Image (cartoon, helix red, strand yellow):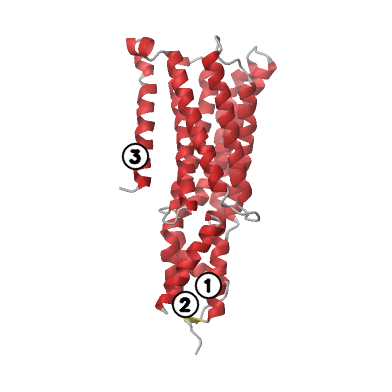
Amino acid sequence: MTTRRRIDIIFAFVMLGLATLLLLRIPLGESAFYSQTLDYKRMLIIGSIIRICSLGAAWFFIRRGAQQFESGNPARKPWRLLEFGLLGYFVAQLLLGSMNTFLADGAPFPSVADALFILSTVILVVAVMSFAKVYSLVGYVAGHRNQAFAIAIVMSIVLIFINWKALSPVVQADVPIIETVVNCAYPILDSLLAIASLVLLRITVGFLGGYLWRVWLALLAGFICLAAGDILYAYVSTMEMTNLDPIMDVMFTWSYLLLARGAIDHCQLIASDDA
Amino acid sequence: MAQTYNTKRVAETIARVVSPFVGEAMGQSAGSFFLKRLGLTADELNPDEFEAVLKELKKGLKVFIGQSKADELAEEVRSAVSGAA
């Protein structure tokens, strides 16, 4: 069994295990296990550690991979942007996890972590869009520009509708303006990230069966999970369906694990002799 | 007599070497794409033309896998084709 295969199995096992543990909280939230052994606070701390480690690994390996793209290479800028975006997410998650762990009332909202998450999402959107632009300019890949454009249009319409539905009550809610702005910024920016990711996924599907396809599939699936988690969060929190929080936790945890998996794969692909 | 390289073999070797990275479909099209872009349609390539193909290959691959890995794959193509010529 190859090292890559072993890592795949470990990641699949961790992702499924965590999803099971988190989702069982919905029907079994009142059980002794979830109310005593693995209560909300403990789950929050464990979840934070997993997210921080995943984002740290994603940032570290994307950084190592990005260093292989020499100055003057058109792909260098998008890789560096991805590196900085993930660094921002890592630091933001570290701050959020620390506040949730050490402050009696948990992290305030909004906090400096939110500002960092929002800024980093903007960087990630620009990174993914830059990849789409750079890859589509390479002759033998650029066969599907019209389809990519069609995906962008259709997804924009779908996500405008979803955001309009989810954010209408948020905008009308009687809360400080800064909370409204932050509550709206997450799903809107993540929608842009999802659209850019789907466009890039259409372009990179040309690599189907190759090592590059595995890298991009993991990275873009990670971004799509992130967007789905934030959009769902806006809707669920507005509708006060807090019992569905574990679904968002699964989305965010899967997102960061997938980003780490893609980053490790990319680093192996670029650096090793036998990929 | 100067060494020549069989055009079909060059395209096939490029496809074989790059396919594990960019996938079967993209690998197949890459081989013929670079030859076509350089206007090389003859059955045999002279050494300058072969070098030009390798240069285009590196240029095309470096965007996806970086310069050093692209150089590595181009050298693999050179060795495979030269060894068979």
| For the residues bearing labels 1 and 2, Cβ distance under 8 angstroms | yes
Q: Position of residue A66 (x, y in %)?
A: 57, 47
Mark 2: amino acid:
Thr
> Would residue A214 appear left or right of A95 to someone viewing this image?
left
Q: Nearer the viewer, residue A114 or A228?
A: A114
- Check chain identity for marks 1 and 2: say if they share one: yes
Mark 2, Cα crowd under 10 Å, few <14 / some 14-19 / many 20+, is: many
Mark 1: amino acid:
Leu
Q: Chain letter of disc 2?
A: B
Note whether A228 is above or below B9 in the view shown. Answer: above
Q: Nearer the viewer, residue A5 or A271?
A: A271
Q: Quadrant of residue A12?
A: top left
Residue visible at 38% across and 17% down in the picture:
A26
- Check chain identity for marks 3 and 2: say if they share one: no
Residue visible at 48% across and 16% down in the picture:
A241
Residue visible at 44% across and 24% down in the picture:
A247
Q: Secondary structure at mark 2?
A: helix
- Check chain identity for marks 1 and 3: say if they share one: no
**Numbered label attached to residue A4:** none
Q: Which residue is mark 3?
A: A9
Q: Chain letter of disc 3?
A: A
Q: Nearer the viewer, residue A37 or A236?
A: A37
Q: Nearer the viewer, mark 3 or mark 2?
A: 3
**Numbered label attached to residue B7:** 2
Mark 3, Cα crowd under 10 Å, few <14 / some 14-19 / many 20+, is: few
Q: Secondary structure at mark 1?
A: helix
Q: Nearer the viewer, mark 1 or mark 3?
A: 3
Note whether A28 is above or below B5 in the view shown. Answer: above
Q: In the image as oriented, which residue stretches furthest toward the left? A: A1
Q: Earlier in the sequence, mark 1 or mark 2?
A: 2
Q: Which residue is mark 1?
A: B35
Mark 3: amino acid:
Ile
